[in-house]
């Protein structure tokens, strides 16, 4: 099993504060004889009829020596996980959870925004100090 990101518990706590129930830590995806590990699976009740929304969350800190290298890895991982989820759990929506600093430094810039838009990456922006979700970016 891969190592947890340094913001794993922060993101998990932020989701719980936002009313999400963590159902998988990690969410294991099995496909074609391979096991993949998305950081979290979560579910939230959205109506009185007990309908729920299911998400998968990959958490990234972007603290490596190169933000571009971190972005390349995160985008590749996101696309692989999204493709597998579309086959095995179509109802689950994949998000990339990042800190507000990562959003400001990478994704609010033209370069990062282009990558988000072209690859249809969904973001959860988290305040690591308050352990709260600041923004959901579709």
Image (cartoon, rainbow, N blue to C red):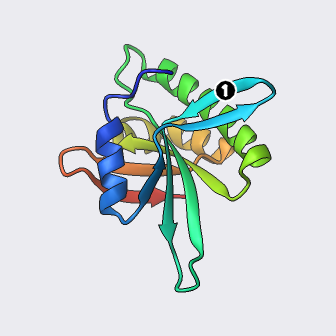
Pointer 1: residues within 10 angstroms few (<14), some, or many (20+)? Answer: few
Question: Would you name the residue on which mark 1 appears?
Answer: 35
Residue 50 appears in which quarter of the rendering? bottom right
Q: Nearer the viewer, residue 35 or 72?
A: 35
Q: Position of residue 44 (x, y in %)?
A: 48, 66
Residue 132 appears in which quarter of the rendering? bottom left
- The structure residue drawn at horizontal position 38% and vertical position 50%, both measured from the top left corner, is 125
Is 8 left, or right, of 124 in this rendering?
A: left
- The structure residue drawn at horizontal position 57% and vertical position 66%, both measured from the top left corner, is 53
Seen from this angle, which residue lies furthest bottom? 48
Position of the C terminus by quadrant: bottom right
**Residue 110 visible to the viewer:** yes
Q: Position of residue 1 (x, y in %)?
A: 51, 21
Q: Nearer the viewer, residue 55 or 28?
A: 28
Is 100 left, or right, of 46 in this rendering?
A: left
Vertical order, 22 against 39 (above or below): below
């Amino acid at each position: 099993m891969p190592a947890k990101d340094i913001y794993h518990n922060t993101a998990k706590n932020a989701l719980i504060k936002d009313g999400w129930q963590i159902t998988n830590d990690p969410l294991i995806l099995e496909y074609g004889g391979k096991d993949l590990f998305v950081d979290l699976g979560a579910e939230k009740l959205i109506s009185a009829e007990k309908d729920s929304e299911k998400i998968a969350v990959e958490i990234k800190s972007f603290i490596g020596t190169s933000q571009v290298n971190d972005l390349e890895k995160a985008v590749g991982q996101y696309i692989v996980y999204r493709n597998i989820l579309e086959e095995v759990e179509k109802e689950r929506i994949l998000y990339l959870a990042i800190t507000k600093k990562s959003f400001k430094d990478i994704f609010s810039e033209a370069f990062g925004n282009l990558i988000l838009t072209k690859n249809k990456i969904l973001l959860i922006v988290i305040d690591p100090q308050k352990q709260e979700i600041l923004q959901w970016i579709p």
